[in-house]
Image: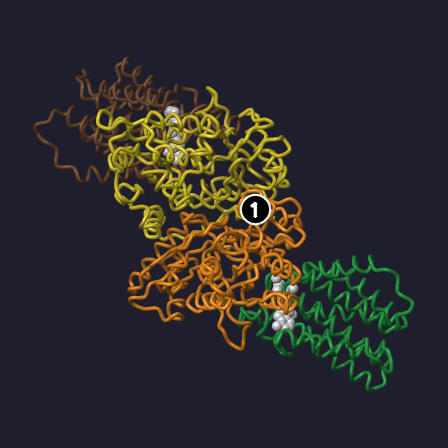
Chain colours: A yellow, B orange, C green, D brown
Amino acid sequence: MATNAPTAMKKLINRVEDLVPESLAGLAAAHPDLVTIDAPNQVVLRAGGPRRGKVALISGGGSGHEPLHGGFVGLGMLDAACAGNVFTSPVPDQMEAATRAVDGGAGVLHIVKNYTGDVLNFQMAAELVAGEIEVSSVVTNDDVAVQDSLYTAGRRGVGVTVLLEKIAGAAAEAGASLVDVTATAVKVNANGRSMGLALTSCIVPAAGTPTFELGPDEVEVGIGIHGEPGRRREKLAPVDDMAEWLVSPIVSDLGLGRGDSVLAFVNGMGGTPLIELYTAFNSVARILGGQGISIGRSLVGSYITSLEMAGFSVTLLRLDDELVRLWDAPVHTPALRWGV
Amino acid sequence: MATNAPTAMKKLINRVEDLVPESLAGLAAAHPDLVTIDAPNQVVLRAGGPRRGKVALISGGGSGHEPLHGGFVGLGMLDAACAGNVFTSPVPDQMEAATRAVDGGAGVLHIVKNYTGDVLNFQMAAELVAGEIEVSSVVTNDDVAVQDSLYTAGRRGVGVTVLLEKIAGAAAEAGASLVDVTATAVKVNANGRSMGLALTSCIVPAAGTPTFELGPDEVEVGIGIHGEPGRRREKLAPVDDMAEWLVSPIVSDLGLGRGDSVLAFVNGMGGTPLIELYTAFNSVARILGGQGISIGRSLVGSYITSLEMAGFSVTLLRLDDELVRLWDAPVHTPALRWGV
Amino acid sequence: MHDALTTWLRTAAARLHEEAAALTALDQAIGDGDHGINMDRGFGAIVAMLDGRPPLDGGLSEAAATADVVRAAGKTLISTVGGASGPLYGTAFLRAAAAVAADHPSSAAAFVAAIEAAATGIGALGKATTGEKTMLDAIVPAAVAARAALDAGGDTASVVRAAADAAEAGSDATIPMLATKGRASYLGERSIGHRDPGATSAALLLRTLADVTGSRPG
Amino acid sequence: MHDALTTWLRTAAARLHEEAAALTALDQAIGDGDHGINMDRGFGAIVAMLDGRPPLDGGLSEAAATADVVRAAGKTLISTVGGASGPLYGTAFLRAAAAVAADHPSSAAAFVAAIEAAATGIGALGKATTGEKTMLDAIVPAAVAARAALDAGGDTASVVRAAADAAEAGSDATIPMLATKGRASYLGERSIGHRDPGATSAALLLRTLADVTGSRPG
Ligand SMILES: Nc1ncnc2c1ncn2[C@@H]1O[C@H](COP(=O)(O)OP(=O)(O)O)[C@@H](O)[C@H]1O
Ligand SMILES: Nc1ncnc2c1ncn2[C@@H]1O[C@H](COP(=O)(O)OP(=O)(O)O)[C@@H](O)[C@H]1O
Ligand SMILES: [Mg+2]
Ligand SMILES: [Mg+2]
Ligand SMILES: [Mg+2]
Ligand SMILES: [Mg+2]
């Protein structure tokens, strides 16, 4: 019996090379009040130009993770997002252009997911503006599926990136300095962990074939957001069990226990519908409840994806009053909006 | 070469029969401030009980279309949503319970998608409360893939249902009478049309096999939201062409032309990621722009789905000042939120 | 008649459970793939309802007792099936219950009246008629054949057998039909060449009734 | 040397284009399936850059002209490849350009210095060393072999051939390695048994250089 992993590429695209620019154009056409596009540089910019005196937040990475990052540009979140080709980090020129475009004199924070390519390209971009614009960087590395050891490139940056962009964005909107916004960002990364699994692979448009093959009853556990194979394969199991596979390592890594309050983020990988994500959230809530960990805030939806991959990830962020206040602060972007 | 239509069922579920109740429980756990669940009746209720003097809006239908309808319960939209089994309309008892639970003395509007099952079950529910609660019904039938003739059960209710629930909900929140809310709802249905296509089938959990088979290069055009096969099959084509297949019949059916302003809604069927939906929106915007039809408002995302089906639908709603004002009015539900 | 119908409902539940996948497959071809699931759920609920019913009140007439259980079955279907078939079959049972409650010269006549009432009820609620590729294409011919058998002096077993034979022929006849009601109508020409799920379940119900009434005194 | 390197860049672009799918397949196994696409895009941009370059300024020394085109190629890679390989290969080219700009007793010596500089540049930027299943496992042995061939009195053709042979052997050697850098490191033990895409592209680049310099005066 075949698996439902995509083996033939069926996508809503014109030419493969047009996917990213046309998708960005569509984003701008749907949200002209929120964003504008620097097409040559494939940068999504917050409408209205740089905010004088406000710390600017920039992120970016390979495309294929939508709404991350372009969908998070707007009030209370990012000032710019640099879109690379699918699963390929953007180049330094893009981050340089974005940094120059959004600088309001208070400095720029680069939010970088921990992948060698992203780190190196953002690093080169920072060098290109060194001495002209004050830049600080935070690297997210929340994926507990990867050991943070000398034997790896370090934990990957995944779900926490979404929460960090929202929370650090709120701090910047409130007028915090670059040092303080950076400190808040570091705090979010330090208190958040994630893990994900895939029910199907995804197809990189330029490759045209699935990145990995999965049997009809197989699940890839510990995947990243680039269709990288995970750490191990398991048989398909009830969602209660699969949620346990993801929640347990996070809870122990964060040392969460009775009385702690968390933001619970159940994220879809792109091809999993909401009826299943809420079912997964129900499992996660049951597991956390059983351990006396309370869900202070929650987020359920497909916010950091791997193209059409089916599956989900769980991110838990330990909350305190400051983080709750910043999370609740107004945000107005294509993908996240409240309080305005 | 195999297709990427799912042939093996891989879902985030426990037992098939637990999917709907557990998904509803997850919705409530994620949004305790917005909704509560009447579990025995599988009804999602707006938190805080009935609103005195406000016309109450109820919708419902088979599950598998999430966030429709439960995700649209809240301020400025629905007061209750009745969840049937997957793709099976709820039973009269559910609508009766919901109607009794939300009535605030100003009457209740039943929003029904035009399918024989939905129409008959809502009709029976209305009979069960006749004489006790004032109920009026609006049946959405916006799918131009089906001819509205003696030879069919009539056009299906699809994308317009989402827009109608938002706009009629805003009218009710503003204090309009049952007669006026109903008139607004009828106006939305009369001015909106939709059409969709599928790149893959979906798998009804209790069936366990795809509802239809598609070749690796085939597209099912004119599908509904229940995995019903469409009107015709086409070869996979560039999204510009596929968007044309959907937009043209809508534009001609609505008689749209130069100078008209529309709300353009590009909807994902459940398994199609945002990078593709924005690309499709870009195509739709280009087509409408070429005809001098302006996009006054837009909505892009997976709001009325068919489980994990890949594909998209386009809905166009002719706008006037009243509809724009009601669309822009505050809404606060799990799936749609702005102005608050 | 009461005991025969109770046995019928339980036997039908078992057969629908066996046939659920096949009925769903038919519905996948021209509908949304849930008819077998829906019928299985509904008749499963009927069995649970029967199990939970208090023992027959001896004071009730045979006709009243029969009407009672058929009405309860109809209400159960309406409350548990959903979809198009729930209200349609549910209404059919409620109308049939009303029909059997009335006086009839014979139990054969009561069966004929019940089947006719069911057909009329479905047609009225669904605003449909024969030739539209629905359950009516099984039930209407069944009612006609049952009436003819009764007029020819047939007993319960023979009128119900006539109904079952006609229903099966009617179900076969839906294959070449173009659907103009229900989900299958969305397919237009593409609905041709497929058997209608509802006509199939209707034929199954009547065949089961024939087996039950044929083997034991009605 | 300038003309040889220009020919090399164009030939390498052609070969990378042919090999793109194969390199991407290697990256699908232990990475994210884009290495061939990335390299093809980068070298395609280099060809466009070369096509757009003004004719060589006669005033420039051979060394300066060579450094110039290699630097331009490096900048192009940094600006068009992205991912890990963009900055790494780009830096390698920039370092190599600086190396060839200096005085060298022979063109063979210049080539050796360039390959050594490239290896050092990648190691420094990527904070990696040999044995981690990366492009370094092809380039470092290549630099060592080239130096040895030069010390043994080899000419350009032979030092570059030595480098290419060592790079291919080094690429083969990555198969049994456990990755500890780059995406492949996320796989842990599962990275064993797969050839590293970057080491493969590095060997392809050096083999192409050997073919070009072997066939024409360096
Ligand atoms: N208007 C109608 N009149 C009579 N029977 C109908 C009508 N519409 C549908 N049906 C019957 O209902 C069957 C489908 O039932 P089911 O699949 O359970 O409901 P749904 O179509 O809501 O999924 C069809 O095969 C057909 O026989
Ligand atoms: N830290 C590093 N040092 C040296 N080479 C590396 C390092 N990380 C990755 N590489 C090389 O980069 C190659 C992957 O390149 P590519 O697929 O284009 O980038 P990405 O991994 O960002 O998708 C790997 O095969 C490896 O040879
Ligand atoms: Mg990459
Ligand atoms: Mg149904
Ligand atoms: Mg059905
Ligand atoms: Mg790669």
**Between C164 and A295, the one nearer to me in the picture:** A295
Q: Is residue D156 above or below residue A201?
A: above
Give the residue type that dot 1 points to: Leu
> What residue is shown with label 1?
B27
**Residue A236 pos. (x, y %):** 62, 40
Q: Quadrant of ligand 3?
A: top left
* Label 1 CB-ligand 4 distance < 8 A: no
Residue furthest to the left in view is: D59
Answer whether residue D207 is visible to the viewer in this image: no
**Residue visible at 61% across and 58% down?**
B98
**Where B47 falls versus A327 (above or below)?**
below
Instruction: Give how far across and how far down residue D87 sits, in percent.
Output: 31, 29
Label 1 secondary element: helix
Residue D114 in the image: state x and y as whole percent.
25, 21
In the displayed structure, C91 sits above or below D177; it is below
Relative to B289, say whether C162 is above or below: below
Please give left or right for residue A31 compared with residue B146 in the image: left
